[in-house]
Image (cartoon, rainbow, N blue to C red):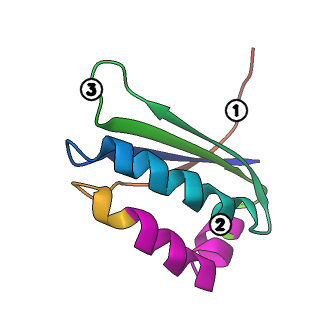
Amino acid sequence: MILEHAPLSVKPGQEEAFEAAFSRAKDIIAGMPGFGRLTLSRCLERPSAYLLLVEWNRLEDHTVGFRGSAEYQQWRNLLHHFYEPFPTVEHYDEVLTA
């Protein structure tokens, strides 16, 4: 399992609209091959900051499969205009659990 980590900075005042758009967008990503699950969390101290965590079976399921799909264009159209600055996405491989 690969964990995608994306801190999202949403333009202030756009949080409600972002959450509504993300509610629609989650169905797009959830239907992609290799998708496991996702969580979207909102920061308590900075209400326009979010953390997106997505589990993928393989790195390529995200970087090639999802990002190279027509569905990604829908995802992009729904969400990318909310971000300022645009997020840096990183991928992690589990090392330890407790």
Residue 30 lies, with reference to residue 55, above or below; the image says below
Q: Residue furthest top?
A: 98
Q: Amino acid at mark 1?
A: Val
Observer-nearest of 65 and 78: 78
- Lateral position of residue 24 relative to residue 19, left or right: right
Q: Position of residue 13 (x, y in %)?
A: 21, 42
Question: Which mark is on residue 28?
Answer: 2
- Disc 2 crowd rating (10 Å Cα; few below 14, some 14-19, many 20+) is some
**Residue appearing at x 51%, y 43% in the figure:** 52
Question: Which mark is on residue 95?
Answer: 1
Residue highlighted by disc 3: 46
C-alpha span from label 3 to label 2: 27 Å
Q: Quadrant location of residue 67?
A: bottom right
Magenta stretch containing residue 66, yes or no? Answer: yes
Q: Position of residue 37 (x, y in %)?
A: 73, 46
Q: Earlier in the sequence, mark 1 or mark 2?
A: 2
Mark 1: secondary structure? loop
C-alpha span from label 1 to label 3: 29 Å
Q: Amino acid at mark 3?
A: Arg
